[in-house]
Amino acid sequence: MSDPEGIGTLTGPSLPAHLYVHVPFCRLKCSYCDFFSVPVEDAEGVEAVLAGIEEEILEWGRARLSGILDTVYVGGGTPTIIGPGVIRILESVRTSLPARTDGEVTVEANPDSATARLVEALAAAGVTRVSLGVQSFDDEIIGLLGRLHTVEEAHVAARAVCDAGLDLAIDLMCGVPGQSLRSWHCTLEEGIETGAKHVSVYPLALEDGTPLAVAVGAGLVSSPDSDAAADMMLLAEDVLGAAGFERYEVANYAVPGHESRHNTAYWTGESYIGVGPAAHGMLDPETAGASGVRTGVGTDVARVRYSNASDIEEWLQGAGRDVETLSKAEVAREDVMLGLRLARGVGARIVAAAGLEEQLRQLEAEGLVELAGGGVKQRWRTTTRGWLLGNEVFRRVWLPDQ
Amino acid sequence: MTEPRLIRNFSIIAHIDHGKSTLADRVLELTHTVYGRDMKDQVLDTMDIERERGITIKAQAVRVMYDADDGETYQLNLIDTPGHVDFTYEVSRSLQACEGALLVVDAGQGVEAQTVANAQLAMNAHLGVIPLINKIDLPQADAERVSHEIEEALTIPGEEAILTSGKTGAGVRDALEAVVRRVPPPQGDSDAPLRALIFDSYFDPYRGVVGLIRVVDGHIAKGMKLRMMATGVTTEAEEVGVRRPANQPVEGLGVGEVGYLITGLKDPALVRVGDTVTLAKRGSEEPLPGYREVKPMVFTGMFPIDGDQYPDLREALDKLRLNDAALVFEPESSHALGFGFRVGFLGLLHLEVVKERLEREFGLDLLATAPSVEYHVRKTNGETIVVQSPQDMPDVGSIDRIEEPFLRAMILVPPDYVGAVMELAEGRRATFKDMQYLSKTTVELHYDIPLGELIMDFFDQLKSRTRGYASLDYEYIGYRESQLVKLDILLAGKPIDALSFIVHKDKAYYRGKTLSEKLREIIPRQFFEVPIQAAIGGRVIARETVRAKRKDVLAKCYGGDVSRKRKLLEKQKAGKKRMKAVGNVEVPQEAFMAILKVDE
């Protein structure tokens, strides 16, 4: 990993070190999810998407940029639902793009589709890490979330991942209507027992238009209680901490050495490629130009973010890509905002260079951030309370002129 | 110029929503004043807000030519008036220019409070009143009952009523025949020096103030040197004309005629409504009887959400005042809300209309504080001061007594709801005066009630408790002493001047408590605890707490989320902009109006 603080020293277009592939299929959409996915349909549709992904990867290969892939993340959707298709994607990456031998290759999986056979095949194809969407070890909560697996299936899938010698990461969800602190405590304990080395803890967010949001709106389900979620997030830190997990990001805990390198790239201003319908990528302006993501030339463009069309037909035709550019000043603020998500925080000099020292001093007075270390190693870090009230911190960093 | 015997001047008066403006549309059609292509609903209501809400705010005058059954062509000057009690003064002004009035009564709704009030205004002005039972095309129309109510409530023989429908046009010709036969022609001396009454005015950005006038004696013509009798200003008739309904210049106007006068004067204060226009030389010495000046009754603080808009707000208010003599304002500053204006209105509808126009026509984002009335405070040192804003109320110790404005309210309601009305009135410190059965379906109640209580959501409450059946009218009766105290609201320990209000001593505890509770619901959780206190002169009488927000975080933030969540933060911040930062507490606009929603 390059040091994000060294950003700006790059010259010329280069191959980003990180690749995200979006597989837009699910068996059934979960009640709270607003990520882009469609029900897995006929084999032809899946084949068309797979071929499109292969083509998009190949295009990056043809660009012949210097650089080596460090991490690959296949997410979705539910990548494992297309089974061997995932292996085809990984094969295409291997043959098109140079990659590190000790690279991190993660595949997202749901307990109901991560069979032992598939997991073994994934391991053989170079996968090093499986992120399992467990969400809860309470069948009632799993049901409310509209997920199709059972607690038992989650255990079986987790065992299969560990048996195949892969790093297991699990997602757990708190703040679900009807979820008790006790149920959450059990879920945390059971999660630790699976042998996972990485746990993500997400408080449920009601996203507009999701079935859960509709049910809450209609009064069929009580709305998530943010105080209960706060208690659960605090409990997670205690329980996971006692089991040797360190919180390295707002929502992420890992046994030291098992942090997600891919995800860390998102928070440290590193470039990444996004492939597949609705996938997002982030590039420096030169690479964006060289790869054809961005054609226009603007002044003061320091970062280019793009998202592929979410309409599959449109994406297959290579159309409908959204491109957003950020100025140097915006990049500086975005880096501080994202860096404050990390336990290690952001160097004081970077904060000063972004012109945000005054804002952080104010946040410090309010107990939301703190200054750690001394001299050149001085860093701004978010406090536990600041993490719970992250939006207050992030908003004032991203939009400092109150 | 038309001979007075062929002129009829009349108003259309009614309770709000009884169909005046639609009836006026039919008159314009029947007399070929407006042709198909230019015909639209509510022709005479020119403001957007009038059309949208289906109400008339400003009176309008129009001349129509009517071929009557007797073979003569009459000049009819029709004046469409507002029906809402806030604009009663517009009605009384219009009536000064008329000899008759068409009193429109909805055939389904029957006689309502403003029907009675407006009919009394017309009868006191000695006008011939012709009742119309309108909307007879409706299935719920009950002309017999309504005719009975007209007889009982207005002492006008029921058989004189004409059945009309503004929708189908039925009976409209009969109504105009009645105007010709029953409304007396104007009387005046055509040889006497000019006397014309300015009964309304509006501001035209190109022509200056346009006065609507009614000639009583003599005549007025273009180029004449004129004098305004009250202000003493001399000027010249730049243009004289009639409204059909667009302005149409004419050579002159004679006795009894209604039209407009443009003098080139730009300042509305110099062309005052109620003033008499006469000749500059050898003019009349005796002005026409004017009418009482309108006085604002309800006051509110108006503050721009964005302080930079303060000069824009001043300019916008200045512009509105050109056409709205009843609007008064002066600068006000608040610790909580910054610089704004204390604005006086005739009533709540007037307030609402002005606020909406400021926001829509001038693009302002405004915060209005809860409406208040004008208190007369007698201090222990003998001095008397006038207080329009709670924040100006002096210390309790220096007050000898406080007087507040009272109204005589008339409420018309079906007998089933009399109990509900009494209950509401008692809760609002109203004193019962009398009650009378107008018909089997309508009871008329009279109360003396403090205006301060009436503006506290009284009308909405009255409507909801009577399922919309009650109607209300009122007149000002004077100041009376009341046991009043000023209640302060403190947020996070700091008194917020814009939330203070004046309340009767016996209700202070209840209102302080319920308002604190209401504010607790309205003020969003901040990331620190916000205590809300209600206090009288430093003594806290109620306390609530907005608990600190503990969790507010976008937990998932991976590749694709970054842009999306940045935008969400921007949206959140935009949401905050709609709130007012009072100290470091974000207070939504509705908090400043919450006192109105404190139900009994």
Image (cartoon, coloured by chain):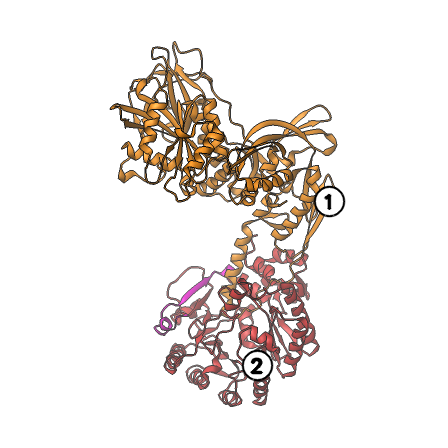
Which label is found at residue A150? 2
**Residue closest to the eye, B361 or A377:** B361
Name which residue lies at 33% across and 33% down: B172
On whether residue A326 falls in the magenta region, the answer is yes
Q: Which amino acid does label 1 sit on?
A: Ile
Which chain letter goes with mark 2? A
Residue B472, relative to residue B76: is it above or below? below
**Residue closest to the eye, B548 or A86:** B548
Q: Magenta stretch?
A: A310-330
**Residue closest to the eye, A393 or B374:** B374
Q: Mark 1 points at which residue?
A: B541
Expressed as whole percent of the image width and height from the top left, the position of residue B321 reads 47, 31
**Residue closest to the eye, B405 or A145:** B405
Name which residue lies at 54% across and 68% down: B557
Q: Which chain is orange?
A: B
Expressed as whole percent of the image width and height from the top left, the position of residue A369 reads 65, 62
Question: What's the CA distance linking mark 2 and mark 1?
Answer: 55 Å
Residue B54, relative to residue B8: is it above or below? below
Q: Is residue B303 visible?
A: no
Helix, strand or loop at mark 1: strand
Q: Which chain is red?
A: A
Q: Residue furthest left?
A: B71
Q: Is residue B424 visible?
A: yes
Near mark 2 (Cα within 10 A), the count class, few <14, some 14-19 or many ≥20, is some
* Quadrant housing the N terminus of chain A: bottom right
Horizontal side, residue A294 vs residue B399: left or right: left
On whether residue B406 falls in the magenta region, the answer is no
Expressed as whole percent of the image width and height from the top left, the position of residue B156 reads 44, 27
